[in-house]
Image (cartoon, helix red, strand yellow):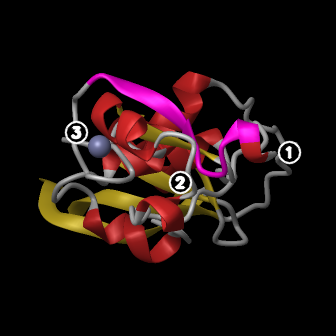
């Protein structure tokens, strides 16, 4: 019994909730079911995995702070050069600081110690090391959560409602 992705009336992802809370919203008529996982709670009540609110909730924009932890989280704790996971990771400046590269979401990536040392003060092109993904500013902390819950084969039906995962 898993988590449920809640969409705003506008179909934008709003939050992640428990299946119990989702079922309550459905029963009260506050939300509609968009996806279920084929398992049934009762004979005629399939377990929801994606629901959509019938009313619009205004969400204030919250910027994600640029921190080491958040960069590693964005990069899924994976070296962006050699794809090593669960290693001791460092932050690499894609354009080295000595060459004018700044501390920005677009210029910082997770890199294992080996790759960071190998790359040194060169650009990826000079070092002939390509990036796994182009670093970008993450959409929101909800986006992080969604990435986490859709790892492996989990909650695949969420993906069609979320841009960029
Ligand atoms: Zn590496």
Residue 81 is left or right of residue 136, and the answer is left
- Image position, residue 36 (x, y; %): 27, 66
Q: Nearer the viewer, mark 3 or mark 2?
A: 3
Residue 71 position, x and y percent, is 56, 36
Q: Quadrant of residue 31?
A: bottom right
Would residue 6 be seen by someone viewing this image from the given angle? yes
> How far apart are the alpha carbons under marks 3 and 2?
30 Å
Identify the secondary structure beneath mark 2: strand
Left or right of residue 84, residue 39 in this image:
left
Q: Which residues are magenta?
A: 88-98
Please give the residue where the numbered disc 2 appears in the rendered image. 6
Q: Is residue 17 visible?
A: no
The numbered disc on residue 61 is 1
Q: Position of residue 7 (x, y in %)?
A: 59, 60
Mark 3 surroundings: few (<14), some (14-19) or many (≥20) residues within 10 A: some
- Earlier residue among tags 3 and 1: 1
> Mark 2, residues whose alpha carbon is within 10 Å: few (<14), some, or many (≥20)?
many
In the image, which is nearer the foreground, mark 1 or mark 2? 1
Q: Is residue 93 magenta?
A: yes
From the viewer's side, name the closer residue of 8 and 138.
138
What secondary structure is marked by label 3?
loop
Please give the residue where the numbered disc 3 appears in the rendered image.
85
**Residue drawn at (75%, 61%) of the image:** 55
């Amino acid at each position: 019994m898993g988590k449920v992705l809640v969409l705003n009336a506008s179909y934008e992802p709003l939050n992640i909730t428990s299946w119990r809370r989702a079922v309550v919203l459905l029963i009260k008529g506050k939300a509609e079911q968009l996806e279920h996982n084929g398992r049934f709670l009762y004979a005629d009540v399939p377990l929801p995995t994606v629901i959509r609110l019938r009313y619009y909730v205004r969400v204030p924009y919250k910027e994600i702070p640029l921190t080491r932890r958040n960069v590693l989280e964005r990069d899924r704790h994976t070296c962006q050069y050699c794809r090593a996971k669960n290693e001791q990771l460092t932050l690499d400046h894609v354009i080295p600081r000595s060459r004018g590269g700044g501390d920005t979401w677009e210029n910082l990536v997770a890199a294992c110690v080996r790759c960071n040392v190998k790359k040194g003060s060169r650009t990826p092109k000079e070092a002939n090391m390509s990036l796994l993904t182009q670093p970008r500013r993450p959409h929101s902390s909800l986006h992080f959560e969604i990435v986490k819950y859709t790892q492996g084969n989990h909650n695949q039906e969420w993906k069609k409602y979320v841009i960029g995962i």
